Image: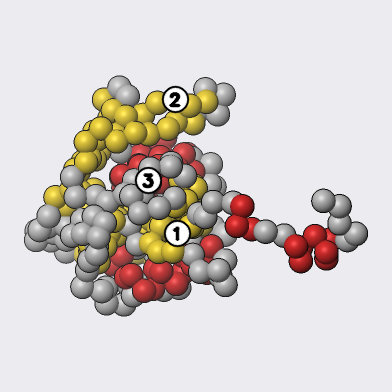
Amino acid sequence: MEYASEEEFLKNYDSSIFEKISMTTDILLISVSSKKQNNYRKKSEKMMSILLVKREDYPYKDQWCLPGGFLDVSETLDECARRVLKKETNLSDIYLEQLYTFSSVDRDPRMRIVSTSYIALVDKNSFTNTLHSNASWFDIIKINEDKNLVEILLSNGDEIISFILKRTLRDKTTDRYQFSVIENTKLAFDHAIVILSGIERLKNKISYTDIVFNMMGEYFTLGELQQVYEVILNKKLLDPAFRRIIAEKVEKTDKIKSGAGHRPSFLYRYKK
């Protein structure tokens, strides 16, 4: 059929010829924060944590998932991510950036749903908002990588979530991988894949961006900063090598951190 103008075409356009599809956003909040110590003389340890929400409805009722929700036709993806984060967790005013879009045809048993995931790096100890009762921070107590398998163990003190994923090289030229779930307990949808994808992205970005400083306060010691790098990279770093990595990123201040049982240390800050 020929149309005289675009206006005429749009007036007669029949959108029902296409199958319906829904969009959601899922938010991966990652924190690297100091673990509470009972012994004041012991050096504080850093722990990576992820915020999860327990589902109250089917599907996956009573299982844990990332905060997320459906996109309204009147909002952008960014607006949706901020809205559902507030609704699901009671957290707001957090910088979010897009991670990946997940579009496996069977990722949701309800219907064809494509999800755009977001990632945020925060210090959970700095929040003054009270979390909703069904939201909880889970510490990553183990990331075990064995050849092409990755095992992750999460705990919030009351429950343990474990999952194993297979990592397959998708594009050698860009060093990109795809993941598939081998074992999973208590984690809904494909959120095990979202979590590992976010951790892998963070490990890569920490080497060529200053993203890690979103997890730091205004002032910090070099030891504290090194601990954050080590937790994210899941390996120990040599002090001299680490100092070279961050030499141009930080500046020394005249402030000193001191405490019972610890040697006083100069405080640094991010060099903007």
- In the image, taking residue 42 as reference, residue 13 lies left or right, namely right
Which residue matches tag 3?
Answer: 107
* Dot placed on the residue nearer the N-terminal end, 3 or 1: 1
Q: Is residue 239 left or right of residue 258?
A: right
Q: Using a 10 Å C-alpha cutoff, classify the residue at mark 3 as few (fewer than 14 neighbours), some (14 to 19) or many (20 or more).
A: some
**N-terminal label among 1 and 2:** 1
Q: Are marks 3 and 1 in contact (CB under 8 Å)?
A: no
The x, y position of residue 31, in whole percent, is 33, 57
**Residue labelled with disc 2:** 169
Under circle 1, the secondary element is: strand
Q: Quadrant of residue 184?
A: top left
Asked which secondary structure carries label 2, the reply is strand
Q: Which mark is residue 189?
A: none
CB within 8 Å, label 2 to label 3: no
Residue of label 1: 25
Q: Position of residue 256 (x, y in %)?
A: 35, 64
Secondary structure category for the residue under label 3: loop
The kind of residue tagged 1 is Thr
* Residue 52 visible at all: yes
Asked if residue 266 is positioned above or below residue 94 in the image, the reply reads: above
**Quick check: can you spot residue 226?**
no
Marks 1 and 2, Cα distance to the nearest angstrom? 26 Å
